Image (spheres, rainbow, N blue to C red):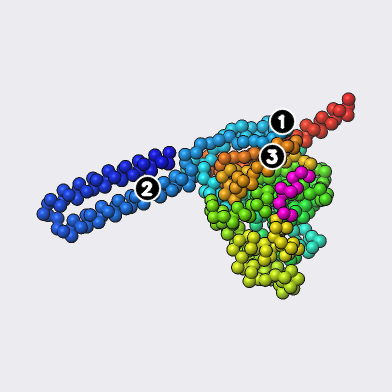
Amino acid sequence: MLGNLCLHLNLFLDDLLKSKNELIQILADFTLFSFDNLYLIKLIAKMSTAFLTAIAVIMCILFRILNVNSQPLKPSVWCLDQQFLDCIYKIAPVLREPYVPTRLWGFSGHVQTVLHSIVGRVKCPWPLGERVYLLLQDGSTLTYDLYQPINEAEDDVTIAICPGIGNTSESVYIRTFVHYSQVHGYRCAVLNHIGALNSVQVTSTRIFSYGHTDDFSDMIDNLHKKYPNSRIVAVGFSLGGNLVTKYMGESAKSKPHTILGGISICQGYNAEEGTKWLLNWQNFRRFYLYVMTENVKSIILKHRHVLLSDEVKQRHNLNEREIIAAATLPELDEAYTRRVHNFSTTQELYKWSSSLHFLNNIEKPMIFINAKDDPLVPEELLPPIKEFALSRPNTAYIELAHGGHLGFYEGGLIYPNPVTWLDRTVVAMVGSIVMLHMDAAVGVQKVGYE
């Protein structure tokens, strides 16, 4: 389609140029036009042709970037457990239907990702909740926001949400998801990554990191104390997806028996390999890496009076100039993160952080979601999770052809629907995990009666 478009544009420009040459020749035959006037006519003709050529080139590039020749496709699902899959399809029939992105730009993973980063969601609500403060053993001040359900539900279920890198309960996509969950009868608890909130000061020598699950674990434990009978489903976005998955697979970490399962969205699974891909300029990944690096760096510098005090710099051998000069996450991790977390190399840090190494220890149901056109998570990182989903019961991997990184906008020609495909689907999947647990409980009761 793109080739045909460019061909037609070239033919159109050739015809237009011939017509202009003929017009100039006709005008030259009249003595009414002076030499200067004819020169002006030729100049305008050349400028117009150059302008139209530029427009044609821009259109070709836009058609390529926007990927407008793509068609809506159904999600692909990898799942060994047919009973689990039937349960998912029953509560989330959206998985049997094609995902229809916003027509003009929704088929571009880059546009979806950039709009998610800049705009977040359209007509975003602002759910009302309470902020919970926890003082941790290492001196850190951890906060999470708690939102009660708007509509009553049959079961008491709490969705424990872990946002993406540097995000909080105030992030637009989190607010939309929380509100949609509340409407469907779920209580929500959103972890605020340490250092990310402007209104909460850092009180220890660290902020959040890609593999530090203690903060999420402390939130879960506090939720269990508040609501001991509430069933918990963990949901993680991007970095949060890695943290949720790693937490579910950390056998040494005690977990409340009320945790039913987890859902991971748009994570990369393997920090060791993922950083190598992000260092490449292919698919603009180096640009996205730069943006993420600047975001994390800005959080560190915002709290520099605590994180980069003379005592802290001496204790962890930190060089403030190297931290400020870091242009990529590996450089920032070398200058700051691995030192604060007491790792000898960044490779050790990345191996410890990667959820891939903790998958085999997961005992509860898990659902993983990724998009093939996610510019931050290349397809080469996805085969291990597909293999895992095909080897374990109560596990499913769902892959979409489009959606970008946490975008998944749908509907409309230019203006998308307020609720995204991701919001609708993840809330339905929470219901699937709850239903699976209820069915298992009923089965145990029947066996007991027999």
**In front of the other: 223 or 375:** 375
Most prominent secondary structure in the magenta stretch?
Answer: helix
Quarter of the image where one finds residue 185: top right
Relative image position of residue 360 (x, y in whole percent): 76, 44
Farthest top residue?
450
Where is mark 3, residue-wise?
387
- Quadrant of the frame with the C terminus: top right
Q: How many marks?
A: 3
| Dot placed on the residue nearer the N-terminal end, 2 or 3 | 2
How packed is label 2: few (under 14 Cα within 10 Å), some, or many (20 or more)?
some
Mark number displayed over residue 56 = 2
Q: CA distance from mark 1 to mark 2?
A: 51 Å
Where is mark 1, residue-wise?
82
Relative image position of residue 347 (x, y in whole percent): 70, 58
Label 2 element class:
helix
Q: What's drawn in magenta, residue-wise?
A: 351-361
Mark number displayed over residue 73 = none
Q: Is residue 354 magenta?
A: yes
Label 1 element class:
helix
**In front of the other: 120 or 179:** 120
Q: Amino acid at mark 2?
A: Ala
| Dot placed on the residue nearer the N-terminal end, 3 or 1 | 1
- Quadrant of the frame with the N terminus: top left
